[in-house]
Amino acid sequence: MVLLTRKIEFAASHRYNNPALSPDENRRIFGKCNNPHGHGHNYTLEVTVAGDPDPVTGMVLDLKDLKEILDREVMQRMDHRFLNYEVPELAGQIPTCENIARVIWNLLDPQIKQGKLHRVRLYETPDLFADCYRNGAEGARTQWARGHKPVR
Amino acid sequence: MGSGTQAGAVKVALGRRYRFAASHRLHNPSLSEAENYRIYGKCNNPYGHGHNYVVEVVVSGEPDPATGMIANLTELDGFVEREVLEPFDHKSLNEDVEAFRNKVPTTEILCMEIFWRLKAFPMAKLERVRVQETSNNSFEYAGDREEGLER
């Protein structure tokens, strides 16, 4: 098995605010990420696909195909967008690095037909990233949890 | 509310990088001077030398639906600050850190020490620690004394 990684960058804005919580609680939990008009980042996305090189082409998958998938599923959806308002897949979720990475995983996974999606790594800054891997088990939908204890 | 993603289908982990500067000397007192120099080379120079270390900490868990977070970064930052950065930054690892009194502070040993200090983080599961000694050397440890962490 060989791992192939492609990197793209996009710029987007977001805001952390849970409407189920009070303004004070939002401020306490999210700090400046709760500022009312949002803020932005240059995100770096690394997408890793695992597979055996095709004996004819020597490729795990055609990089051109992967580039088109990333452009369609990620760039066109998220680049230069306000993630809270303009990306329907993130509606009802706090657009943290963790949640954005998982949304990207769920967008890409069904599109990768050659090889298998192995890892999605999303850098929000050079010092902060989220990784997604396959877990096997299906789980419940993520949604606002009213009264959920926010800080563990 | 909204089109949430399927929690549990993927494993999500959060990685954060921290930095500290410290000095060390690689020297094993049970070996001869000549042997120490042969093994450790210039890292055995008597007064030590330093590095800007980068520590990459990866924790995993289910993002809290209310916050979207695996672990609140303020809490993770505070924990790493208290357990690693405050005791190590601008210190001599050999002289100032009790854990290295009887161990050679190679970055392998340092990486393991940091892992076990951070393992106690109560808010998420520590997956691994990677310590970069220079831009060309890095060391990674995911624990091997507990079930499920063997590598």
Image: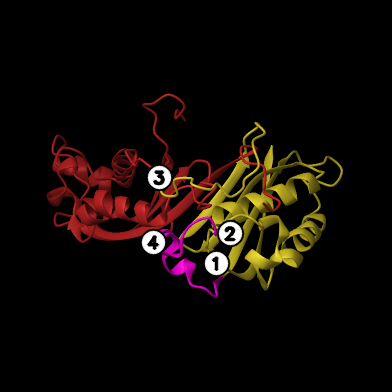
Pick whichever, A137 or A29, lies toward us.
A29
**Circle 1/circle 2 CB separation < 8 Å:** yes
Span colored in magenta = A19-40
Q: What element carries label 1?
A: loop
Q: Can residue A117 be seen in this view?
A: yes
Q: How far apart are marks 3 and 4 (CA)?
A: 14 Å
| Badge 3 or badge 1: first in the primary sequence | 1
Q: Mark 4 lies on which chain?
A: A
Label for residue A15? 1
| Badge 1 or badge 2: first in the primary sequence | 1
**Circle 3/circle 1 CB separation < 8 Å:** no
In this figure, which residue is indicated by the disc labeled 3? A152
Label for residue B40? none
**Circle 3/circle 2 CB separation < 8 Å:** no
Q: Is mark 4 on a helix, strand or loop?
A: helix
In this figure, which residue is indicated by the disc labeled 2? A95
Could you classify mark 1 by the number of other residues whose Cα lies within 10 Å: few (under 14), some (14-19), or many (20 or more)? many
| Badge 3 or badge 2: first in the primary sequence | 2
- Residue A86 lies, with reference to residue A149, above or below; the image says below
Could you classify mark 3 by the number of other residues whose Cα lies within 10 Å: few (under 14), some (14-19), or many (20 or more)? few
Count how many numbered circles sit on residues in the image: 4
Res A2 → quadrant: top right
